[in-house]
Image: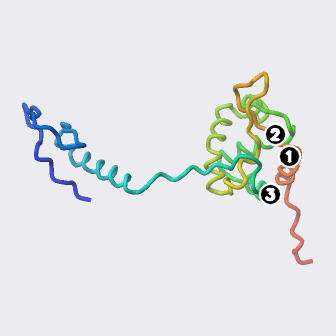
């Protein structure tokens, strides 16, 4: 992309704005000559962005129960991820599955997993992006329930899994049985 020609009103030493009004929808701004190409490029990018259309709608799980549930295979794949987010979420799910239906605050999860509170918060913040990239987040939602706090911690989010999801998670974390198709 080539930079447009400088405007017909470049600032000069001792320059003062004219009394002529700016064209409709425009404002005159003094910019150092060295920055004119950068400003022109920025304006072109902004212009192109406005023509591109509205931003993509956010993909969030629909309210209510998920359309599809997490299978043991999907949970197993999540448990074997190698990123720091995968490892922290797996530790969180281990703690949740150990006590189904208990509401855990982030502080509780930090104590249960032995990970710093900041790691738990960071993993939860990155989890949605990870799930959107590698799983059917819109159809399944999170692999645990996130609810408003307990009576003693009403302003804090809590995390939990029910007994069925806990059993699926424990099965996903167990070693895979040997393949039955091995030759004898």
Q: Residues within 10 Å of mark 2 (few under 14, many from 20)?
A: many
Pointer 3: what residue? 71
Q: Residue at x 65, y 35 (%)?
A: 121
Q: Where is the N terminus found, in terms of image quarters? A: bottom left
In this orientation, which residue lies closer to the viewer: 74 or 64? 64
Q: CA distance from mark 1 to mark 2?
A: 7 Å
Q: Residue at x 70, y 53 (%)?
A: 81
Left or right of residue 135: residue 3: left
Q: Residues within 10 Å of mark 1 (few under 14, many from 20)?
A: many
Residue lying farthest bottom? 183
Q: Position of residue 95 (x, y in %)?
A: 81, 39
Q: Residue at x 78, y 33 (%)?
A: 104
Q: Residues within 10 Å of mark 3 (few under 14, many from 20)?
A: some
Secondary element under disc 1, as helix, strand or loop, is helix
Secondary element under disc 2, as helix, strand or loop, is helix
Q: Position of residue 144 (x, y in %)?
A: 76, 44
Residue 166 image label? 1
Q: Position of residue 133 (x, y in %)?
A: 61, 55
CB under 8 Å between callouts 3 and 1? no
Pointer 2: what residue? 96
Secondary element under disc 3, as helix, strand or loop, is loop
Q: CA distance from mark 2 to mark 3?
A: 17 Å
């Amino acid at each position: 992309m080539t930079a447009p020609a400088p405007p017909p009103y470049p600032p000069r030493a001792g320059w003062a704005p004219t009394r002529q009004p700016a064209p409709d929808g425009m404002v005159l701004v003094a910019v150092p000559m060295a920055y004119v190409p950068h400003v022109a490029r920025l304006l072109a990018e902004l212009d192109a962005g406005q023509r591109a259309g509205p931003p993509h709608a956010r993909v969030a799980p629909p309210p209510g129960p998920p359309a599809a549930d997490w299978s043991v295979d999907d949970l197993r794949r999540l448990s074997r991820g190698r990123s720091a987010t995968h490892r922290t979420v797996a530790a969180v799910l281990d703690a949740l599955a150990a006590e189904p239906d208990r509401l855990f605050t982030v502080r509780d999860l930090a104590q249960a997993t032995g990970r710093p509170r900041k790691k738990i918060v960071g993993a939860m913040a990155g989890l949605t992006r990870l799930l959107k990239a590698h799983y059917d987040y819109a159809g399944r939602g999170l692999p645990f329930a996130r609810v408003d706090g307990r009576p003693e911690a009403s302003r804090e989010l809590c995390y939990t899994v029910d007994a069925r999801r806990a059993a699926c998670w424990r099965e996903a974390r167990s070693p895979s049985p040997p393949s039955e198709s091995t030759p004898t």
